[in-house]
Each structure stands twice: as C-alpha cells, then as structure tokens.
Amino acid sequence: MKNKIGLKTQDCIQLSDQLNQLLSNYQLLYMNVRGFHWNIKGNNFFELHVKFEEIYNNLQLKIDELAERILTLGFTPVHSYSDHLKHSSVKEKTNISDGKLAMEEVLNAFEIIILLQREILAIAGDANDEGTNALMSDYIREQEKLTWMYSAYLNQ
C-alpha cells in the first residue's frame, strides 16, 4: 500500500520513526545552544555569542523542516519536551559558560546527529524517498563542514 506521495506506507512508518528521533535530537541541541548563547563568558564572548545565535537559528529552521517532512509522510511529529527527552541521544546541558566546553558539546551532538542522518539517508534511499534523501544529504554536507570548522576553532 502506498501513501499520497507514492511511497510505501511501511517504509514511511520506519522513516517517520527515525525522523522523529532526529527531530528530538535537534530539539535538545537547540535548547542547549540557546543556553550556551545566553550564558557564554570569557575572552571569546562576542564571537561565540553571535556564533551560538547563528547555530540555534539554523537548528530552528531544520526542526521545522523535519516536522513538516514527517507530516508529508503522513505521520505526526513528536512535539512534547518529555517525548523529546525520551527519544534524544543528545542530552541536556545546563549552565555551561565556558566557550571551549560549549563548542565541544556542539561537536559531540553533531557526531550523534550526523550518524543518525546517515542511517535515515540509507533508509530513504531504499524507500526511493527523494524528499527525505535530499534533506539528509544537505544536512550532512553542511554539518561535516561545520564539524571541520569547529574542530579547527578548538585546535583539535
């Protein structure tokens, strides 16, 4: 059986489950980065305050795109904080004001997210889901570059 966009319903169930997990990881990272933005202190305050705002604005766009993709596949995006906490491998980080530690947390979250996106990319490829495939490819390409840049910033 196929849905309204011509994809097998069973494939869409698996994709929407994985996309909801990704959505939850993005939500936790978003909340963490907002906290980094608000609480950052030290010599790099001005550059990191702006950088964290750039990151969370980008995450907010992706969160919306993911939720809309889940809806397009015919399912409901997870939207409660308790559900996000249950489904996320990215964990809450509170009261981080050290810029180096905050950037390391962003990198750790990207590692989790990129791996999950690669899994979704494989599932989407098998399901001939070009819409999800395109999103994942774009996100992976962008985050691989950011991982390199943030690692260079941290001298890693």
Image (cartoon, rainbow, N blue to C red):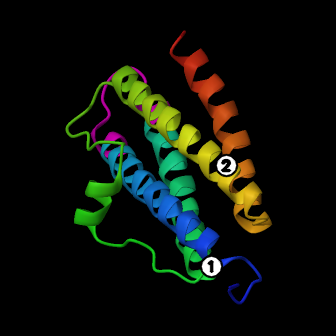
* Image quadrant in which the C terminus is located: top right
Horizontal placement of 25 versus 136: left or right? Answer: left
**Mark 2: few, some, or many residues within 10 Å (few <14, many ≥20)?**
some
C-alpha gap between disc 1 and disc 2: 25 Å
Q: Where is residue 86 in the image (x, y as percent from the top left)?
A: 27, 56
Q: Is residue 41 above or below residue 91?
A: above
- Magenta stretch, main secondary structure class: helix
State the image coordinates of residue 29 (x, y, percent, origin top left): 40, 47
Could you say whether the residue bearing mark 2 is in a helix, strand or loop?
helix
The magenta stretch spans which residues? Answer: 36-48
**75 lies above or below 130:** below
**Residue bearing the label numbered 2:** 139
Q: Which amino acid does label 2 sit on?
A: Tyr
Q: What residue type is labelled 1?
A: Thr
Q: Which residue is drawn at 39% across and 71% down?
A: 78
Give the mark toward the camera: 1 or 2: 1
Q: Residue 108 appears at what percent x and percent y?
A: 44, 30
Residue carrying label 1? 9
Dot 1 surroundings within 10 Å: few (below 14), some, or many (20 or more)? some
Camera-side residue of 134 and 60: 134
Question: Quadrant of the image for the N terminus?
Answer: bottom right
Camera-nearest residue between 142 and 67: 67
